Amino acid sequence: MADKTDKIFTNFKEHSVAEFFKKNKQMLGFAGKVRSLTTIVHEYVTNSIDACEEGGILPEITVRIAEISKNERYTVAIQDNGPGIPKKHLGKALGQMLAGTKFHRYAQQRGQQGIGAAGCTMFAQITTGKPVKVVSEYRDKRLMCKVGVDIKTNSPDITDEIEEENPQKAHGLFIEGEFGECKYERSAQSPSEYIKRIALANPHVTISLTEPSGETTTYTRSSEIVPAKPKEVLPHPLGLGVSDIVEMAHRDAKSRSISKFLQSGFQRVSSARVDELKGLLDGRTEGLAPIDFEKKPPEMTWGEGEALIKAFAMVKWIAPAADCIRPIGAEQIQASLANILAPEFIAVTERPPKIYKGGIPFLVEAAIAWGGQAGRRSSTNEIGSDIIRYANAAPLLFDTSGCSITQAVKDVDWKRYKMKNFEEEAISVFVNVASVHVPYTSAGKQALSQEEEVYQEIKNAVMEAARRLQLHLSGINKERDQELRRSAILRYVQQLSKDVVDLAGKGKADEVNAKLQNLIETKYKSHIMGEDA
Ligand SMILES: Nc1ncnc2c1ncn2[C@@H]1O[C@H](COP(=O)(O)OP(=O)(O)OP(=O)(O)O)[C@@H](O)[C@H]1O
Ligand SMILES: [Mg+2]
């Protein structure tokens, strides 16, 4: 037995995060040739917009996709006018997984994990063997280099580095990668659709896409206002799990004690709240291990973290501040939908921020466009409903069925809102979920998980818009009914005029006809104008 066990453990090995994601690249969205190409565009574009907003710059982004050969190899090049990346961080930002400026922050940005850019570098490397080319213009320097990922150690591999002066202080980042196992096509999940949807929800962005055919489409910004800088907030005690709090405590080398760590690292934790927690965690409450609040935070054990999380749930907290949430804005959504879908009717709902998991603020914006170009057209030109999903104004094109947004929209009882068969209506339902921490189902960031509060709020927001659509449709039906009655009566007027003249033995049928017609038209006109004639 001992021998056998020894044999098993001779194969015991460690592996890096990069090795893990190389094996599980589908988790990053690299699954399927079309999807892989859209994922690359998505990761780079969201990074560019995040960086520009952080720098208070109106984003100007160009994306160029070119086919290198017919064997499904493409170059993707993106240029932005953001702040660029300083030399010191460039390698890690683009060549190391779980490295970035956003992971440890509670701020509403499109990226949150520190995987996207390095994931693309890795994908280039494993499908073509080539690193990505980068030009970073940051302050008074221009750095040109190639970046790869050392998969074994999850560390950046920088080559061909050239540094120049940048006296004009131009700023921005250029990345060009060569990617295999990709395919460009114009479909509902293609880069062209992705960029269109970026433009739809980000009116301050000017973005252009050059497709492999050489055709360039440019979406010019309709708003000159840079959205307010993402506001960083402290986490609320109710939004955390045990590993989060233990990890935060271990990173805190500054606070003198766990008491101080709680007061400085979280929102809504006053000294009175700490006293309340101390009361719960003094060893006398059943099921709660005691905690020494005076020891240094890095000494916090897992058991203590667990006890703290349990105690958090027993205390009454003030809800977290929600002023860190930046919605797209009802006016903007209305203008964008009108512009792109030219529908007959639009309803946008504006709702206040809500909280999920007790401590994470979020906000749902929903809109319904009906008629015109709204809805989806199949290859045989049949019309069907379309659900346009966003998280922090970044489009979600994949994993539709596994997404809480899709679920919530489909669970609405559409018949109540005069939609006989939702699937077959010319209707587009737009939903944006904005939060400092979006509950994605995976690192590929294409679907939202089933958080009850988020699901319910999406459903409520959509139902609010649907109620307005229903009122509009009832109005249309009323008009249609009246029109039917008017034309039915008019059909009999001519015969009636003749009969009346015959019976009376005097008068002219034409004159009677004109008079009667006039009478009917006046009655229906005043009906439409709203008077009860
Ligand atoms: N175009 C850019 N301009 C400036 N900085 C950038 C740019 N692209 C990436 N970065 C920096 O590189 C870091 C890593 O980017 P990456 O996409 O890997 O992670 P992320 O955006 O933080 O999170 P996510 O994995 O969710 O996308 C970012 O946090 C940012 O600091
Ligand atoms: Mg990113």
Image (cartoon, grey):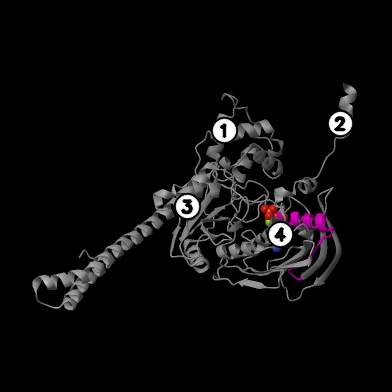
Residue denoted by label 1: 311
Q: Amino acid at mark 2?
A: Phe
Distance from the alpha carbon under mark 2 to that under mark 4: 40 Å
Residue 366 vs residue 170, the one in the foreground: 366
Q: Which structural element holds mark 2?
A: helix
Q: Amino acid at mark 4?
A: Leu
Measured as percent of width and height from the top left, residue 138 is found at 74, 67
Front position among marks 1 and 3: 3
Q: Indicate the quadrant containing the C terminus: top left, top right, bottom left or bottom right.
A: bottom left
In this rendering, position of residue 458 left or right of residue 49: left
Front position among marks 1 and 4: 4
Q: Quadrant of ligand 1?
A: bottom right
Q: Amino acid at mark 3?
A: Phe
Does the image show residue 53? no
Q: Is residue 123 a member of the stretch shown in magenta?
A: yes
Q: Residues within 10 Å of mark 2 (few under 14, many from 20)?
A: few
Residue denoted by label 3: 422
Measured as percent of width and height from the top left, residue 208 is found at 65, 70
Identify the mark nearer the N-term, 2 or 3: 2
Identify the mark nearer the N-term, 2 or 4: 2
Residue denoted by label 4: 37
* Snapshot quadrant of residue 165: bottom right
**Cβ–Cβ under 8 Å for marks 3 and 4:** no
Q: Which structural element holds mark 4?
A: helix
Figure check: 377 above or below 519:
above
Residue denoted by label 2: 9
Q: Which residues are magenta?
A: 116-140
Q: Amino acid at mark 1?
A: Ala
Identify the mark nearer the N-term, 1 or 3: 1
Q: What residue appears at the point 67 percent right and 30 percent down from the top-left corner? A: 303
Distance from the alpha carbon under mark 3 to that under mark 4: 31 Å
